[in-house]
Amino acid sequence: MTIRLGVVGVGRRGHDWVRIVRETPGFELAACVDTDSAGLRQAARGLGVPLDRCHSRLEDALDSARPDALLVATPLDRHVDPCRAALARGMPLLVEKPFATSLREARQLQALADQTGTPLLVGQNYRYTRMPRAVRRLVDEGVLGRVGLVACEAYRGQQERLSPAAKTIRDAVLWELAVHHVDALRYVLRQEVVHVLAQSFSLPWSAAPPGASLQILLAFDGGSRASYCASYDAVGNEFFERGSRFHLRVLGERGSLSVWQRWLTLSLRGRLPRLVSRGRREVPEEVVLLRQLERAIRSGEEPECSGRDNLKTVAVLEACVRSAAEGRWVDPRELLREPI
């Protein structure tokens, strides 16, 4: 049976999801929802979506289109309300990252999903791109031996390419960019973060809201350590991929792995460095998430990107906020034990 999906939010990311849903066998676009009526009509024309499937109020879409599940792709600071509306109706849900911009709200949503027995997934699609999958494979196979240290850097510039949320909310680089990389580190290392020390700041020339740059130290329960640096105020990246630069270095007892953009170089003790293939991209990362949603709906299978799992990522981000404000190490596990 085809799963009919309603997509909430038809901005840049919502456009992608509408196209992917319509191209994925077993799924059908039931409705598009956006509070910006003019933008919704424009998006509908560009995407070829019939106007009778477009709604400016979520309640109208849920009542008239009656989708089987909901996909929330609203701006990153507006996820909570549509998620709550879907879960209150027991409607399976896939929400774009970040789950929510506070751990308390994310935990409340997961509690509501548990109460109603509703599948809840978070769109951490970066896990399934080829680079993280290749790094995870090398770590799993023991090619590097025990991983001791990971250094990760992510830079973006060209303000016109940033999302509207990145131009308006505090700590946007944390909630929009670092959320990908923190989650990917958990996924690649198969370890959980136990201590966080963070600084959030703006560079002198920044035109963005406070917190457009970020530095984090992370300690994992398996003994690995990581450093992370990210900024939305990088200059001179115009000729890189959409104004973005990415670097990763993984240090193990047998050698190291370096990632620059899309190139992976493996350097083992006593051997010449060599390039490592990222592997094939069998399906888009978003389709991986849709298939997890499908299995959760049809068989009750716990998704790998479940809201329950993603609470650990949100807890790390919340720990970063508190650490930056209080100037101390913070344990994300303690935050998950706080009352909601």
Image (cartoon, helix red, strand yellow):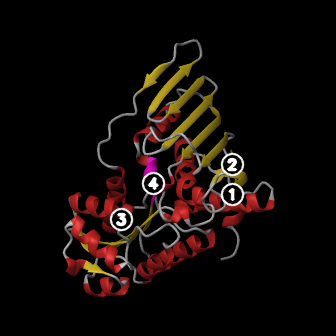
Q: How crowded is mark 4: few (under 14 residues within 10 Å), some or many (20 or more)?
A: few
Within the magenta stretch, is there residue 97?
no
Q: Name the residue under label 2.
A: 216
Residue 239 found in image quarter: top left
Mark 2 secondary-structure assignment: strand
Residue 253 found in image quarter: top right
Looking at the picture, does residue 174 appear above or below residue 251? below
Looking at the picture, does residue 54 appear above or below residue 287? below
Mark 3 secondary-structure assignment: helix
Q: Which one is closest to the eye, mark 1 or mark 4?
A: 4
Name the residue at 63% across, 54% down.
206
In which quadrant is the C terminus drawn?
A: bottom right
What whole-number distance in Å separates the C-alpha atoms at marks 4 and 3?
16 Å
Q: How crowded is mark 2: few (under 14 residues within 10 Å), some or many (20 or more)?
A: many
Q: Residue 14 has which mark?
A: 3
What whole-number distance in Å separates the C-alpha atoms at marks 1 and 4?
25 Å
Q: Earlier in the sequence, mark 4 or mark 3?
A: 3
User: What amino acid is at disc 3?
Assistant: Gly
Label 1 close to label 2 by CB (< 8 Å)? yes
Question: What residue range appears in magenta?
Answer: 123-127
Marker count (numbered)? 4
Mark 4 secondary-structure assignment: helix
Q: Position of residue 63 (x, y in %)?
A: 30, 87
